[in-house]
Amino acid sequence: MTQEQTDSLIEYGPRRYIITITVVLCTLLELIDTTVVNVATNTLMGNLGATISEVSWVIASYAIANVIIVPMSSWLSAQFGRKKYFAGSVALFTFASLMCGLSESIWTLVFWRFVQGIGGGALFATSQTILKEIYPPEKIGMAMAMFGMGVIVGPTIGPYLGGYLVYNYSWPVIFYINIPIGIIATFLTLTYIRDNPYEKNSGNGIDWLGIILLIVGIGSLQLVLEQGERNDWFESQYIVSFTILAVLGIIGFIVRMLTTEHPIVDLRVLAKGNVAIATVMNFILGFILFGSVFIYPIYMQRFLGFTAELSGEMFIPGAMLSGLLMPVVGGLLSKGTPPKFMIIGGFTITGIFVYWSSFIFTSNTGADAMFWPLLVRGFGMAFLFVPLSALTLGGLNGKDVGQASGISNMIRQIGGSMSVAIIGVLNETLSAEHRANILQHVTPDNILLQERLAGMKNGLMAASGDGEKASQQALAFLNYSIDKQASILSYIDIFHYLTVFIVVTVPIVLLAKTYKLNQDSMGGH
């Protein structure tokens, strides 16, 4: 695509701002729905008569559909036209939201969540491409900043919003709130968003083999990551089978994409600009971002007695700080600040947050102790999303923008899922090790322990008058305390591992080339 063609896609005046609001709103909707259901699991179990394993599919089905559709978004956009594809995706997401709320059985809800994920996956990847095209080069930094606000705020307010709606209303409302916004967004899309006339369908038919390999490979990988812990990983034949499918599917998909003339996901884009390095950095971001967010709510709810709503609330100040800093970050990028240095800074600040977290996790940490580390996390995140988008898209043009955006977003999501899976395994393994170490000191000749047990027994016996029952309760409380301490020690270890991971991997970004946003290089080679 020539510079003249690129310029012809730029929008001006109110039209540009309406399109910006529309795509950012759609991104926000999609990302809120990735986390909004997480806090409603107990309610769904009660209302739909489902087990925790069945309810987990409500979350997993959405993630699996997302990770399949995101890398295909650029190809699908070329097949159907930008406007139709984006409007159709918003409409599908909105209709699926309605059907989710109307579901009367758990498996009906799982099905409609999968459909919702298909619609939602397109919103995230295509929004980024649209914003890149409608802004002139000197303002792309600010456009990416507005997009970044949605990226950070969405997953953060999802759990809080879900907790609030479930507690004050009922679980279907978490889906119904999408409907009026979705209807407005569909109307605005059809009215204001234009097709990209240079994003042409090759006209060489549909690569069904490529699509099947993508669904089998990436879909199976996401399924393994989402469901592995609940099924004892490779102790389960079910997980082993899908792991084999994932490996074969991904290898077959890579081979197919590199050998076919018209691939649905053009992996050759990894050789252009900084796409390969940016993809690695997106994986690291997903790994760190989702990993830290995964640990905090579990710790707050399991050991500190926080409600889901309160634990979600703890992340909001950091998200608001990120949002406020986004225009500053966008301005720095527009003035020519190399994104790789901002990314190094953002990860350094995030590393400080991760290491700091290892010092505040105790059995009686209060909300005040977590406020400042989570605020630092928000500060660090502000310097990651937008510069990473700039790093990914720098030096690209035309269809390469959509392809790179789809690949990097998919990899970030896989990084997050992989992080949660690995942390789950580490938590289980390390907790068992710490419990074994603690039990070495739980012996009959430990005078302090015996005095503590006697004190608990006397206190409980004073309340119940039953000596035998008081002894059993004291031992049960001791066992709970040991488990609690072992888990907290495992979280501390995990934060140390994450810190080392950041220190070792982040310098890779220094290998990136510099493409300034206000130069033609952003438009391509």
Image (cartoon, rainbow, N blue to C red):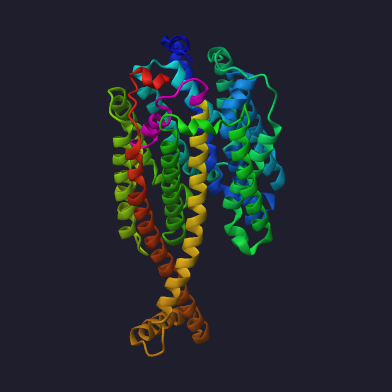
Q: Position of residue 437 (x, y in %)?
A: 41, 76
Q: Position of residue 380 (x, y in %)?
A: 32, 41
Tell me where residue 230 sits by quadrant. Answer: bottom right
Q: Residue sitting at 35 percent across and 24 percent down?
A: 141
Towards the viewer: 23 or 345: 345
The answer to whether residue 113 of the structure is visible from this angle is: no
In the image as oriented, which residue stretches furthest toward the bottom? 445
Q: Position of residue 371 (x, y in %)?
A: 32, 48
Q: Residue sitting at 48 percent across and 46 percent down?
A: 415
Q: Specify whether 441 is left or right of 116.
A: left
Q: Is residue 411 above or below residue 431?
A: above
Q: Position of residue 91 (x, y in %)?
A: 63, 25
Q: Specify whether 385 is left or right of 249.
A: left
The answer to whether residue 492 of the structure is visible from this angle is: yes
Secondary structure, magenta segment, majority class: helix
In the image as oriented, which residue stretches furthest toward the front? 259
Numbered marks: total? 0
Residue 398 belongs to magenta span: yes
Q: Is residue 448 above or below residue 22?
A: below
Q: Is residue 208 above or below residue 293?
A: above
Towards the viewer: 476 or 292: 292
| Quarter of the figure with the C terminus | top left
Q: Residue sitting at 45 percent across and 29 percent down?
A: 272
Q: Residue sitting at 34 percent across and 51 percent down?
A: 504
Tell me where residue 438 sits by quadrant. Answer: bottom left
Q: Is residue 20 above or below residue 54?
A: above
Towards the viewer: 450 or 346: 346
Residue 195 belongs to magenta span: no
**What range of the chain is rendered magenta?**
382-401
